[in-house]
């Protein structure tokens, strides 16, 4: 009798484990709120020759009721100075003011501000390509 009870307990435990394992293996269909999207904002300047990287979620963006947050990563075969000069020239045409401009051997960083928004561009060479990263944030202290 004790052997039969032990056998039933073992079977019940195995069945429970199989159910839990089966549930854990179920694929969950992502909804729109959990997927990564990199919708480019209209006021982000991108030099010719650079393409957005988002295949492995390098880029993402979110906009809700005037609040914006994004990180866009671009790469391509354009010189760092050419890309940076293009951004320096075009951002003011979109109403942005340059707040910071630092060129170093490793990277060039240019920060622009417009109202409550801030866009920081970083340019660097990596793996034989120019990489441009744009960090776009909303700063309500700038009202």
Image (tube, rainbow, N blue to C red):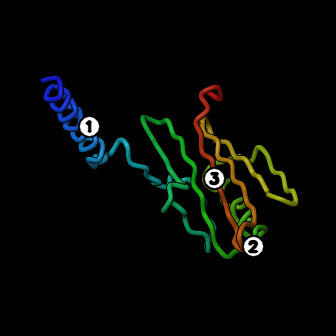
**Residue 137 placement (x, y as % from top left):** 59, 40
Q: CA distance from mark 2 to mark 1?
A: 57 Å
Q: Point out which mark residue 91 bears.
A: none
Left/right of residue 106 with respect to residue 11 in the rendered view: right
State left or right for residue 77 relative to residue 21.
Answer: right
- Which corner quadrant holds the C terminus? top right
Q: Secondary structure at mark 3?
A: strand
Picture coordinates of residue 85, whole percent (x, y) = 75, 64
Q: Residue at x 51, y 40 (%)?
A: 68
- Within 10 Å of disc 3 (Cα), the crowding (few <14, some 14-19, many 20+) is many
Quadrant assignment, res 132 = bottom right
* Residue at the image position 55 percent from the left and 55 percent from the top: 58
> Which of the two residues, 29 or 110, is positioned nearer the viewer here?
29
Q: Which residue is mark 3?
A: 134
Residue at left offset 23%, top offset 41%: 18
Q: Sequence-wise, which precedes: disc 1 or disc 3?
A: 1
- The image position of residue 35, as x and y in percent, is 38, 48
Which label belongs to residue 17? 1
């Amino acid at each position: 009798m004790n052997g039969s009870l032990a056998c039933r307990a073992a079977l019940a435990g195995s069945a429970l484990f199989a159910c839990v394992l089966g549930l854990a293996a179920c694929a969950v269909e992502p909804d729109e709120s959990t997927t990564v999207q990199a919708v480019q904002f209209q006021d982000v300047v991108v030099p010719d020759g650079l393409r957005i990287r988002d295949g492995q979620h390098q880029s993402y963006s979110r906009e809700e009721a005037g609040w914006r947050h994004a990180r866009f990563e671009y790469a391509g075969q354009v010189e760092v100075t050419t890309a940076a000069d293009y951004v320096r020239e075009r951002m003011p045409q979109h109403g942005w003011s340059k707040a910071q401009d630092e060129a170093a051997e490793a990277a060039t960083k240019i920060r622009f501000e417009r109202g409550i928004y801030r866009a920081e561009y970083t340019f660097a060479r990596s793996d034989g390509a120019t990489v441009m990263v744009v960090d776009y944030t909303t700063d309500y202290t700038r009202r």
